Image: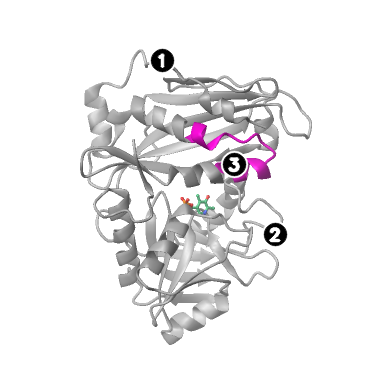
Amino acid sequence: MATVADAKIQFTRQLHPAPTSPQARAQILANPGFGTSFSDHMVSIEWDEQRGWHDAVVGPRGPILLDPAAAVLHYAQEIFEGLKAYSQSDGSIALFRPEANAARFNQSARRLAMPELPEELFIESVRQLVAADRDWLPTVEGGSLYLRPFMFASEAFLGVRPAKQYRYLVIASPAGNYFKSGAPAVSIWVSDYTRAAPGGTGAAKCGGNYAASLVPQAEAIERGHDQVVFLDAAEHRWIEELGGMNLYFVFADGSLVTPALTGTILPGITRDSLLALARDEGLTVREERYSLDQWRDDAKSGRLVETFACGTAAVVTPVGKVAGRDGEFTIGTGGPGQLTQKLKNRLVAIQRGEAPDPHGWVMKL
Ligand SMILES: *Cc1c(COP(=O)(O)O)cnc(C)c1O
């Protein structure tokens, strides 16, 4: 629906009249946490059938006006992305594989019957926001500026059809290092709920998937675990992913398995990057289904030595313990595994410009 000409649209720049004071900002940046503080600006672009993408603005971040009948509030037509801007060792700022986020954003848009955003416009929008808020990159070691592009149906109507008006926004949130040195291993709960069914929206990054995962996640916490892992909807046997992270299994012979992208799993960019890095190391990585029963047997026999989850926010998180209705089992020693740590270090070094970038993943701004 959007034409290439849309990508040439000019951004209007409006600086924040009362930006956060340097002192208050410094305090936030020294200990940013995750997802709780936000930079001064945001990007907004509108779409309608007549004009396509228009009215691109980098302006002050603040509340948005929405009609109570806006379609997103009733039928959840909303998609999002998550990527980070990193300070490089040479002092510049870089994005990691933003074109992969742009492409996935449009895959999500197609599944949710929303207009596509030209990939160049997606990247330009992120660039514009980082340029406006470059003082918001955390000063703490391992910090980054988390960027959240998203789109929702803004047309006011009640009726079940794709909306005719959309709004695309990008906001930014300074993020600390999830874990300072080696990440502690997490305990995960095997849910009886399913996240995604064949033919559903499991491969799309849409808010609705997360709404449906909150009860399962709360159940995991209630039972004393950190995260929830979902099995496939049809047989309730094959491991899919966590609520917001993909999974890797590491075997004693040095090979790895990650569940194949069958349409019910979110195609993670961290997952894809680690696949390439593991293969660069000469390791065998199989993308195939892996069952809960096999996982338990392999962990007990020692054939499986590590399991880790991966995603942009926490990068790589070791899994130490798995519990479900049929009991629990420990993976390896229950702590972070060696290959998990090695792959994580390799990825983080590329993201921060501390190691060569053979795949051309880093985009300097
Ligand atoms: C975003 C997301 C991931 C991780 O994707 P990355 O591109 O690696 O950040 C994994 N699973 C779900 C459900 C997600 O929404």
Residue type (three-letter) at the residue carrying disc 1: Gln
Q: Earlier in the sequence, mark 2 or mark 1?
A: 1
Residue 76 in the image, given as x and y percentages of width and height = 66, 37
Residue drawn at the location 67% of the way across and 32% of the way down: 1
- The magenta stretch spans which residues? 105-122
Residue 319 visible somewhere in the drawing: no
Q: Main secondary structure of the magenta part?
A: helix
Q: Earlier in the sequence, mark 2 or mark 3?
A: 3
Nearer the observer, 162 or 355: 355
Q: Which residue is mark 2?
A: 198
121 drawn magenta: yes
Residue 14 shown left or right of residue 69 in the figure: left
Closer mark to the observer between disc 1 and disc 3: 3
Nearer the observer, 207 or 137: 137
Q: Secondary structure at mark 3?
A: helix
Q: Which residue is mark 1?
A: 14
Q: Which residue is mark 3?
A: 106
Residue 261 visible somewhere in the drawing: yes
Q: Secondary structure at mark 2?
A: loop
